[in-house]
Amino acid sequence: MSVAGTATDRRRLLQLLPLVALWPGGRVRAQESRSERAAPGSTITVGTLGDELAYDVVEIRARAGSEITIDFVNHSGGMPHNIVFVNSDSDINPVGIAALEASKTDYVPQDEIGRIFGYTSMAGPGETVSVTIGVPGKSGSYPYICTYPGHFTVMQGRLIAL
Ligand SMILES: [Cu+2]
């Protein structure tokens, strides 16, 4: 997929995004997705649901203001994925759309970095990457998304700060 920065390319990419939800791999199978509690200072493992555009852990519950480490395992056979934590629901689209043109920075858009409070590097198929994040001090629900082009509309989870 071209991520060249012209307005025409950008429009074409946006038109393609809804198709992602129609791919068989794009369905989230709720029975296989789960919630995990992350104690302060602990490490939890989050993976992909095999080759699907989905995380196996779609809810991480952690104490507000604590630090946790996420080991992210990409179980897919051919697709890169990452985890990017954003400040609120209204930050999902700006970050996901800007990421389309952020190939030079591993699809983490530096011009929208203020909306992001933690991210892994892009994990290739079979790879594991890690990140330690500060859970926001204000209790609430904070989205995490994959910013590989086209994934963010379906590949999502929530960090619940308790
Ligand atoms: Cu992805």
Image: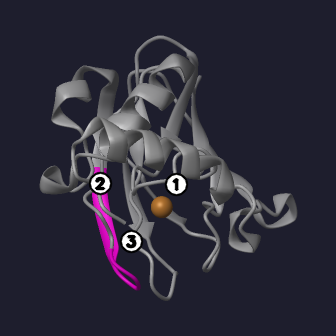
Q: Say whether residue 120 is left or right of residue 77.
A: left
Mark 1 lies within 8 Å of ligand 1 (Cβ measured): yes
Q: Give the quadrant of residue 41.
A: top left
Residue at (15% x, 51% y) in the render: 105
Q: How crowded is mark 1: few (under 14 residues within 10 Å), some or many (20 or more)?
A: many
Q: Which mark is residue 120?
A: 2
Report the magenta residues as a range: 124-131
Find residue 53 and report its horizontal and vertical position in percent.
61, 64
Is residue 40 left or right of 89 when viewed as pictured?
left
The label on residue 78 is none
The residue depicted at 42 percent of the width and 29 percent of the height is 86
State the residue lying farthest toward the top: 138
Q: Do the residues labelled 3 and 2 touch (CB within 8 Å)?
A: no
Query: What's the amino acid at mark 2?
Result: Thr
Residue contact at pointers 2 and 1, CB within 8 angstroms: no
Residue 80 marker: 3
Cβ of mark 3 under 8 A from ligand 1: yes
Residue 98 lies in what quarter of the image? top left
Q: In this view, does 46 lie above or below 65?
A: below
Residue 28 in magenta stretch: no
Distance between the alpha carbons at the discs numbered 1 and 3? 10 Å
> Identity of the amino acid at label 3?
Pro
Q: What residue type is labelled 1?
A: His
Based on the displayed image, in which of its 4 quarters is residue 121 positioned? bottom left
Reading the image, the residue beneath label 1 is 151
Going from the N terminus, do you reach mark 3 or mark 2 first?
Answer: 3
Query: Is 156 displayed left or right of 4 in the figure?
Result: right
Mark 3 neighbour density, 10 Å: few (under 14) some (14–19) many (20 or more):
some
At mark 1, the secondary structure is: loop
